[in-house]
Image (spheres, coloured by chain):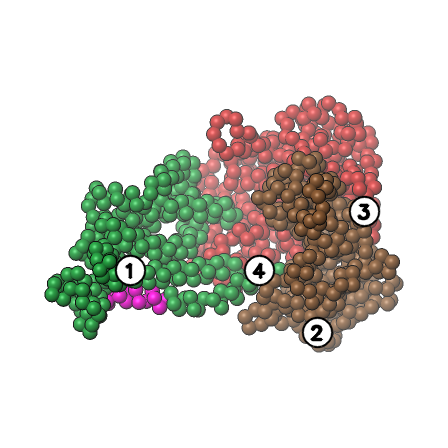
Chain colours: A red, B green, C brown
Amino acid sequence: MSGIPLLSVRGLGKEFRERGFGSGRSVVRAVDDVSFDIHQGETLGLVGESGSGKTTIGRMIVRLEEPTSGRIELRGEDLRDLSGRRLMEFRRDVQMIFQNTQNAFNPRRSIRSVLSDPYEIHRLAAGRELEERIGELMRRVGLTPEMLDRYPQQFSGGQRQRIGIARALALQPSLVIADEPVSGLDVSVQAQVLNLFAGLRRELGLAMLFISHDLRAVYFLCERIAVMYLGRLVEIGPRRRLLENPVHPYTRALVGSIPAFQPGGGFTRTVIQGEISDSEPTATGCHFAPRCALWRELGRPERCREARPPLSPAPGGGMAACHFADVPGSQAAEFGDAAPGAHSAVGPVNLAARLPGGSG
Amino acid sequence: MTAKTMVVTTAPKAAVRRRMPLRTAIGSGLGLLVVLTVAIGPWVIGKDPYAIDIANRFAGPSAEHWLGTDELGRDVASRIASGARATALIALGAVGIATAVAIPLGLLTGFLGGWVDLVVTRVVDLFLAIPSLLVAIGVVGVFGASVTTTVLALGLSYWPFYTRLIRSAVVGIRSRAYIDAARVLGASRWRVIRTEILTGLAPLVLLQTTVLLGFAVLDEAALGFLGLGVQPPQASWGSRLAESREFILAQPELALVAGVPIVVAVFAVNLLSDALRDRLDARRIS
Amino acid sequence: MTPLDETGGTVLEVRDLAVEFPLTGSVVRAVDGVDLDVAAGEIVGVVGESGSGKSVTMLALLGLVHRPGRIVGGSVRLRGTELAGLGPRELARLRGRRMALIPSDAGAALNPVTRIGAQVDEGLARHLPELPRAERQGRILDILRRVGLPRPDTQVRRYPHELSGGMQQRVAVAMGVQLGPDLLIADEPTTALDVTIQAQILRLLLDVREESGTAILFVTHDMTAVAEICDRVLVMYAGQIVESGSVAEVCAAPGHPYTKALLDAIPPLGGEPPEELTTIPGAPPDPRAWPVGCRFAERCPLRRRLGDPAECTSVAPAMATLDSRGSAGRRSRCHFPDALVEAVGGLVR
């Protein structure tokens, strides 16, 4: 990681004010002081549960939302200053792929019309050339130009997602924000779309922010993974380190919640107590503390409630935001999986042994 | 398509397909009748709707006067036919005004939001709080009763709720992901409105226009009946009702004959708009 | 593998179930000859992708196939009672009391304008009207506590939208189990939830089985969840069951190429990720005209490897016992199940 990063996010924050008048409206801090970089051709995975703020970050990067605080820089240039021509150039550089929902496409427009948009808006092609480029785009994502006159609802979920990818690729961006692009797809279709992503990245040298709640998909595609909890970045690092030696208790909980897929191995997940809504966003302490097994085990230290843990380098690469990241034993704390009935605490043990393919 | 959605999608489609022909047939038949009356009615009948013949007043139907004559001996059939033109003009004019106001205002408020939305929405609420009949009476009071003022009066009483309807539709469309996609591609606001929002509004506008046309025919008649619409002797369906009102006890068949075309026209419009709505729904589901 | 224990008894016995949906000009046979058995205390996974017929099968079991769709054949026995000929009213009496559904999206299934307590009470009041009100209240609080809803005494006064998705799903589970049904049908109960919440709900289903011995049909597209909580698994493709057996055996050595393909498509977690995931080429066949031979033949990698044997496209394979695979009860709808094993060897990922 050297040179100027393609994308640089520093101290990014977003507050949503409740609707209404007056100063008494409560403020929801959806994103709270988040920083990370994405380098040319790199894929960063952003994982977290719903309500963690991961989608808001993506939307701020493509300027669908205005940040409340912090800076987003593309090749060292602050996005806030962009307007007019520079903004249009930025649009060509950074594109977004949306979650596959009924709403991702206007049901009244044919695919030909949808895919013409980028070329028309940026006056890149018209007439026969437009026709050729749209056809090429369709082939690139594994569809055929003959499908162009169909309407979005005439396609399967997987095909629609391919069209969404085509729409984003038309402008040949160098960075793509993909927001839950494979959720809601059948397993075999999801594998096809993930392969398409992998191929595009290889061939086009695309950098990507891959936002997903599916750690398996993220692990397959992303060299580095960032974990969000309630608006904050709690851990970021190379995928293998993050999966095999998670430092932050929340990351450990998240990794432990994934079914290890050991057929007949019984219930292999660790069950983390509570929900994201049990944590109250505080300005001071650690958001995860109320659900944190390590916190309870250490006798509920005051520090976790009073001081926000800073992101600091984690062993094996990356960063984690936990006051007790280096507490001996916390790496392999034996929280264990409790007996059925008890919604037990966190603690995957010896991941390499538990995870399929971990030995390879 | 999952088997589960098949359950959902096939049911209404099959039902629509079975029910639509009869209703559409009746609706189109009656609608065609109304359109023909407006277009070539006076020519087919070939009588002057204003020719007075006191000697022949209250005559029953005959080969000479298909629907008889009225209190001044004028030919009722030709008065209804030429009245249909005035009524159609008023209905189209009023709906045109309401649509012309509602679409830009609805887009402005729904798409831009902010203080524009706040101000316009309050004004709309204010208008909605005044009974539309009062608005009409006010307009007639200021400008005097005529075809033009009837158009104005009806248009003024339709735009507020129409604006609201458009606004809420725009707000619904605005939150869809494909609007975000267009913005990320760099589409200007105008382009987003043109390519994404107006295409989504089209079915709603089509449907709402037909429904409003039915209302307008009814309201024109109501204003005419109250003496606030088109003034006799000028022929319209409303003024025809007003004229027959005085003789409603002695010659009830006159009022009946005056009312039937209104019922037929409104019925036709309602049948057609129902068919239209089902068709649009079916298309959205599939 | 949990054998169909005669002492616990067979709870559900389905034979040759078929459901059709007429379309204009054609008929879709969405479920075509499904056999399945569920024993008391057993969790059986039903796995398949969109359009495989798994959800329609469940609707048919519950008597909830709506016009124009209809059950055109087969038998459904719940604790020996034949459901096939029952009228809507009799089926409604069974639903909730003898068999219950946990929907995939509790948020959509709960009535938005009724308080949680009243919704849970609806089932009790309908099926146990003789129970005094005060006692019903107690039972409601008790069941909500058992599904892990914190502070049930305050939650009963809340409306569904005031609860998180996970909590809504817990309420749905409570409504499903409160009358102690023989059979619980959980239709993608965790699909809409975050992973940490998914784990909680799956654990809850295990607890329900543990406590009350309820038989559970767990419908999902997620093979990894099946591997965790199910005893047996049925794999559905194009309206048919193509493989059945104990979870451990099916996952370790799939007896049908489709099952194998499904397992291969799961992105592995840990280690150096592969360049590409294994995918299934093509798309499922048109349900309006199922192929004559094997319905998976068109996409089948095994068929291609075997050099396109004629049977695959001309003879519809029957569900056949895989005797060579150890335990009984393993069945597959493939002409060449043994070739699959030779070609792959063991497969756990």
Q: Which chain carries label 1?
A: B
Residue placed under numbered mark 3 in the picture? C211
Q: Which of A62 and A154 is in front in this view?
A: A154
**Secondary-structure class at tag 1:** helix
Asked whether residue B283 is drawn in magenta, I would say no
Residue placed under numbered mark 1 in the picture? B259
Q: Which amino acid does label 2 sit on?
A: Gly
Marks 2 and 1, how far apart in space?
68 Å
Q: Which of marks 2 and 3 is in front?
A: 3
Q: Is there CB contact under 8 Å for labels 2 and 3? A: no
The spot of residue C56 in percent (x, y) is 66, 61
Q: Which chain carries label 2?
A: C
Dominant secondary structure of the magenta stretch?
A: helix
Residues in magenta, as a range: B28-43
Q: In this view, does A83 lie to the left or right of C287?
A: left
Q: Quadrant of residue B21?
A: bottom left
Q: Which chain carries label 3?
A: C
Sequence-earlier tag: 1 or 4: 4
Q: In the image, is residue C47 above or below residue A275?
A: below
**Secondary-structure class at tag 2:** loop
| Classed neighbour count for the residue bearing mark 4: other residues with Cα under 10 Å, few (<14), some (14–19), many (≥20) | some
The spot of residue C123 in percent (x, y) is 68, 49
Q: Which residue lies furthest to the front in this view?
A: B250
